[in-house]
Amino acid sequence: MKNTDFLPSAYDGHGRLRLPFVFWCVLLLQARTWVVFVMAGASRQQGGTLLDLFYPDHDNFWISLLPGVPAVLAFLLSGRRHQLPHLWPLMRWILILAQLVLLFWQPLLWWQGEPLSGMGLALVIVDGFALWWLLSNRRLRACFSPHED
């Protein structure tokens, strides 16, 4: 029997809860370095310039790809979540851990001497909101529940 806590429009044609739109936005936020990487690869001549603009320190670029790996995996696995009953519920906690890393990443860079910027401050605020949302959204918790009907 379907859970009646959510509107019928929250379910797909197979009766499973759809992942909320904000979830996809949070995944894009977490995978922001991957997005820049793909954009740089797509714009062949300007790719190096684009990477230099967002990541002047190339070592920082390669390290900052790591917290986005769980988001990329969640993108890839989301369509098959019903086939991964043991892995999918863990993905929420992995995404929360990755969001924690991203939340403390920018202040760590400031502590290491990077200048304080409006963009960096905005990223900390948005990362804080994303962490709060991942922890508190009832529908998202239900989507990651191993007993989802």
Image (spheres, rainbow, N blue to C red):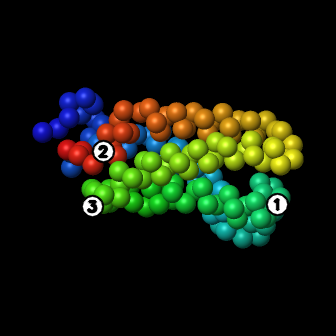
- Residue 148, percent across and down? 24, 45
Check whether the beta carbons of the residues at disc 2 and disc 3 lie within 8 A of each other: no
Mark 2, residue position: 145
- Taking the image as shown, residue 97 lies to the left or right of residue 126, namely left
Give the mark, 2 or 1, whose residue is nearer the N terminus.
Answer: 1
Q: What element carries label 1?
A: loop
Quadrant of the image for the N terminus? Answer: top left
Label number found at residue 9 = none
Badge 3 is on which residue? 83
Please name the amino acid that badge 2 sits on. Answer: Ser
Q: Earlier in the sequence, mark 2 or mark 3?
A: 3
Q: Which residue corresponds to the image point at 20% horizontal and 30% vertical from the top-left? A: 4
Label 3 neighbour load within 10 Å: few <14, some 14-19, many 20+: few
Where residue 13 appears, as percent x and y from the top left, is: 22, 47
Circle nearer the N terminus (3, 1): 1
Residues at marks 2 and 3, CA–CA distance in whole angstroms: 13 Å
Q: What residue type is labelled 1?
A: Asp
- Closest to the camera, between mark 2 and mark 1, is 2
Q: Name the residue under label 1.
A: 57
Locate residue 52 relative to residue 33 in the image: left or right: right
Task: Identify residue type, mark 3.
Answer: Gln
Apparent side of residue 138 relative to residue 125 in the rendered image (left or right): left
Which image quarter: residue 5? Answer: top left
